[in-house]
Amino acid sequence: MTVKTIVVPLISLIALPMRFARPQPLRATGACIDVVHVYEQMTDFHPENQKLRDEIEAKLDRVPQLPFLEGVELKKFMLRQLALTEMFKNDRIAQADLIVMGSHGATGLRGIVGSNTQRIVRNAPMPVLVIKHHVEELKVNDLVFASNFSPIDVEKFDAFRPVIDIWDPKVHLLKVNTPKSFRAQ
């Protein structure tokens, strides 16, 4: 298995250029990068919504000029009338192998993962790589697979394997217990 498609939410591109010193991390995968923006406005008929859409399209048009995307196959698109966590209803995104996000939290607090990133991590059917700090060269030495290890979750580990194949990191398995579904084993 290889990583063929990586989704990068446009909201995350604000943080990613600060994270990568050069395009190596994304180019090294050989994958196509799908840059997507999701917005919830119900209609384009209202002038304010059309203005917002025009601004988003202008941002998407500037994406290929970002230095860290140099030499990377790139597709960019917008999903309208969907909440951020509903983007996985889109067939192309649902079939992606990996999501890459930069994160610093909406308030910019260090050590905090932003609420958008949290929502993506919780709802994504594929692995999510969150890059929180500046990266000269992306080397992933350790990966955490957090799960409650139900039979379905064990199957989901297969979706995690392409990420392991890219960097060959040490994999840490983390059993997640919540008050609602606590198990002592």
Image (cartoon, rainbow, N blue to C red):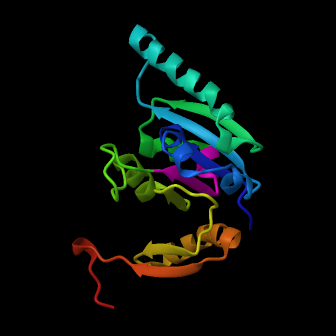
In the displayed structure, does residue 121 sit left or right of residue 183? right
In the displayed structure, does residue 90 sit left or right of residue 81? right
Q: Is residue 93 above or below residue 78?
A: below
Give yes or no for residue 105 being in the magenta stretch: no
Quadrant into which the N terminus falls: bottom right
Q: Position of residue 175 (x, y in %)?
A: 39, 80
User: Which residue is located at x 42 percent, y 51 percent?
Assistant: 117
Magenta-drawn segment:
92-102
Q: Position of residue 94 (x, y in %)?
A: 59, 50
In the displayed structure, does residue 109 sit left or right of residue 74? left
Q: Nearer the viewer, residue 36 or 157?
A: 36
In the displayed structure, does residue 81 sit left or right of residue 92? left
Residue lying furthest left in this view? Answer: 179
User: Which residue is located at x 42 percent, y 8 percent?
Assistant: 47
User: Which residue is located at x 62 percent, y 50 percent?
Assistant: 21
Q: Is residue 84 above or below residue 144?
A: above
Q: Position of residue 92 (x, y in %)?
A: 64, 44
User: Which residue is located at x 57 percent, y 57 percent?
Assistant: 135
Q: Taking the image as drawn, is residue 138 in sight? A: yes
Name the image quarter holding residue 59: top right
Q: Position of residue 52 (x, y in %)?
A: 45, 19
